[in-house]
Image: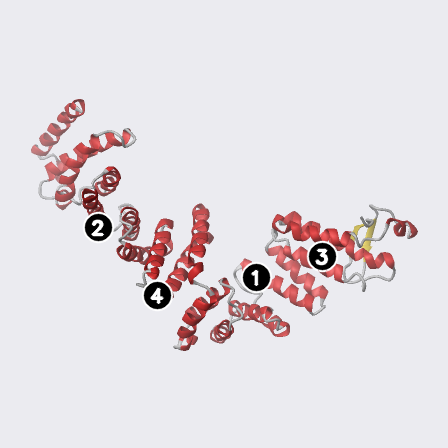
Amino acid sequence: MKTTRSFLLPLIISLFLVAGTGHIAIAQVKGPKYGQDSVKCVMEISLYREFFKQWKSSDYTNISVKDAVVHWRWVFFNCPLGTENTYLDGVKMYNYFIKTEPNNARKELLIDTLMMIYDQRVTYFPNHYKTGQQQAGNILGRKGVDLYQWRPSATQEVFDILKQSVGLDGNQSQTAVIVYYFRTAIELVNSNILGKDVLIELFDQLMQIVEYNIQNNPEGRDDFESVKANLELSVEPYANCGDLVPIFRAKFDAGGDTNPELLRKIINMLDKKNCTTDPLYFDATVKLYELEPNPESAFLIGRMLYKRNEINKSSQYLTQAVDMADTNARADCYLLLADEFRTMKDFSRSRSYAYKCAELRPNDGNPYILIGDLYAASADVCGTDEISKKAAYWVAVDKYYKAKSVDPSIEQVANERIYSYSRAFPALERLFFHDLKEGDSFTVGCWINETTTVRASK
């Protein structure tokens, strides 16, 4: 440590000499930034930073942090605008002091100082030095997360800090902030300080932020996917249909039926928790369509009627929804229409919609499963003899193979159908009787009109 001090002495002397000569460069940085004593401020910044760098270079293990903090304290209290590093380094040092402090009373004082560092940074550096954009939300988020880590009993204070952070940062909120904000909300609900309705509202707010980042933040997508799973698991005990419906019914009946934003929230929450059979879901969906008769609201009401098995009414709305901007939602719409026309025995239109879904979502095997089912259901009506009637099973199985090739998640479903319908293929001797052999090309007629390969039953 003596070596370090001897190295710094010439630097300190040079700072005094430069300041004493009235050097223009020093004069230009004097003023409020360096407090009342600009010379001492510059010197103390240099001293603490040199010791801090030594501590950092030791992987934050040697005792130079104790020398650094002495000079750092002077900078913190006397030239708070000198450099933003004061606050970044201060957080690093005080987190270290808190972690290594064995005395609980002393540790609490250190935590108070850490919180003061965050507060002073917000006061003096509320905006980013490069972009000019506000960074107070980010700073408060870090403050709240650190407070939760070191003083987990301060639930209400952490909640209030993180609420302010999310209010400022919105979609730019950090993942840790979202997780701890919701965690403290749950703790307050368990302590009967907050009601479940507040928790449900918060869940919806945070999920919107998470969904935004999953869609628009490629680098952070995996982290936000994890946060999504965390939130959904955490809210589970507080968000069953018995909890949600009374909360949202009261809002709906109190004038919420004219608020499109609230109606969308009701629909989304009830849909996520599989509460779509409740009359509230029907009422909210219809009201939203009345207020906003667009493709998106048509899809919601069409899907709702589909789930109620009101096929004819549902298809009327779903055909209005195919112009939705969201590709994934449009693919869902096409798949629902395909299934509806399957139910109505309009197999050709059903297949057409299934292919439209596959075009938008090429890695989804469900459209091909549905088409395979259409072909298998046509076996008796698309042939005139024992071969042509069973030929539909060949093309059906082709689609099941296609389904699992594009979508491994449905491999079991596809394999079960392949096994079942392969047993319905013509027997080998019947192929021979009709002058056919395995591997021959065969065109299935009727509405199917596809070419396949001859196979015998297994």
For disc 3, the neighbor class at 10 Å (few under 14, some 14 to 19, many from 20) is: many
11 lies left or right of 420: left
**Which residue is at the front of the view, 355 or 129?**
355
For disc 2, the neighbor class at 10 Å (few under 14, some 14 to 19, many from 20) is: some
Q: Which residue is mark 1?
A: 330
Give the label on residue 195, or none: 4
Q: Farthest left residue? A: 20
Q: Earlier in the sequence, mark 3 or mark 1?
A: 1
Whether residue 320 is visible, yes or no, is no
Q: Is residue 279 above or below residue 408?
A: below
Check whether the beta carbons of the residues at disc 3 and disc 4 lie within 8 A of each other. no
Secondary element at image label 2: helix
Give the label on residue 372, or none: 3
Whether residue 303 is visible, yes or no, is yes
Q: Which residue is mark 2?
A: 119
- In the image, what residue type sits under mark 4? Gly
408 lies left or right of 397: left
Image x and y of residue 169, in percent: 33, 55
Secondary element at image label 4: loop
